[in-house]
Image (spheres, grey):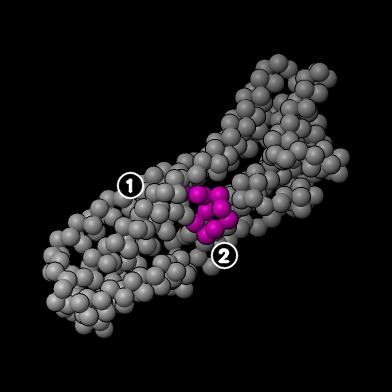
Amino acid sequence: MIINSAIPLKYLFNKVKLELFYVLIIAVIVYYITHIFQNSIPEMPLTIPAFIGTSISILISFKLNQSYDRWWEARKIWGSIVNDSRSLILQFKQYLPDNENINKIAYRQIAWCYALGESLRGLDSKETLKKYLNEIEIEEINKQSNKPLAIIQHHYKDLKQFKNGEKINQFSEVQLDNTLVRLVDAMGKAERIKSTVFPVTYRIFLHLMIYLFTITLSISLKNIESIFEIPLLLVLSAAFFLLEKSATHMQDPFENRPTDTAVTAIARTIEINIKNIIEDKNIPEKLNANKFYLN
């Protein structure tokens, strides 16, 4: 997640350097064609590129709005995971007298948070699981493709054992079950965002519109010297491409990019909170921003 800090120009340039290279080629080609066939090419009024530019602005605005909705939904989902993770451990501490079992469940919940974030980002969570789970649980979890779901299954197994062993009553079981259901529901919502792809054709069409805008504007400005015309085309197209790139990155908040929802930092916050609840002395430091973004 990009924080309120100065974003390096190199980062911004790298996002659009390929598109700007194409714009440069198009601008040079159109400039020389319009000067070679200056008498044959009719005058193009500025209203045409202005109309195309307005259309591009509307399309980008729509995409930015839809992308931000996806990004904000992802952030709200992880906000609910923070709340329910705290609630789960507080409930177990309230209802279950056995501190050893509470600690095991607490560490398992921490592992679930990290594993869910890594799963959404397409990363391997084996090393993370080793920090918080015992070898038996790790072996069973690694047999399944959806590791966060496998971890939740172990929560349910323990809950069933506690109920059968009469360590918790029916009311406590219902409350704990409701919290686990909300966690599974949040996991499903995050996976839905991850698996739902924004239409690629929309991005392609938008890029073609920007290139068309560049061509028409270059023809309209054919009487201007290239030393002024080409930089102007690059600056205007860069603004459109940067906005489009921002929307494209926000629409996929779990791709392990600076614009991601900061799932690792959120999981670390959950770990700190849970360890405080169980009075664990081995509490890690809060994750700080890496340069201009929080992972």
Name the residue beneath numbered marker 1.
62
Above or below, comparing residue 259 to residue 279 in the picture? below
Amino acid found under the numbered disc labelled 1: Phe
The reply to whether dot 2 and dot 1 touch (C-beta < 8 Å) is no
Mark 1: secondary structure? helix
> Residue 131 placed where, x, y %?
78, 50
Which portion, as a residue range, is magenta? 251-260
* Residue 290 tag number: 2
* Relative horizontal placement of residue 178, taking residue 196 as reference (left or right): right
Q: Name the residue rendered at 41%, 73% in the picture.
A: 21
Above or below, comparing residue 114 to residue 22 in the picture? above
* Relative horizontal placement of residue 241, taking residue 282 as reference (left or right): left
> Residue 33 placed where, x, y %?
25, 76
Q: Residues within 10 Å of mark 2 (few under 14, many from 20)?
A: few
Query: What whole-number distance in Å separates the C-alpha atoms at marks 2 and 1?
Result: 31 Å
* Relative horizontal placement of residue 274, taking residue 292 as reference (left or right): right
The nearer-to-camera label among 2 and 1 is 1
Asked if residue 272 shows in the view, the reply is: no
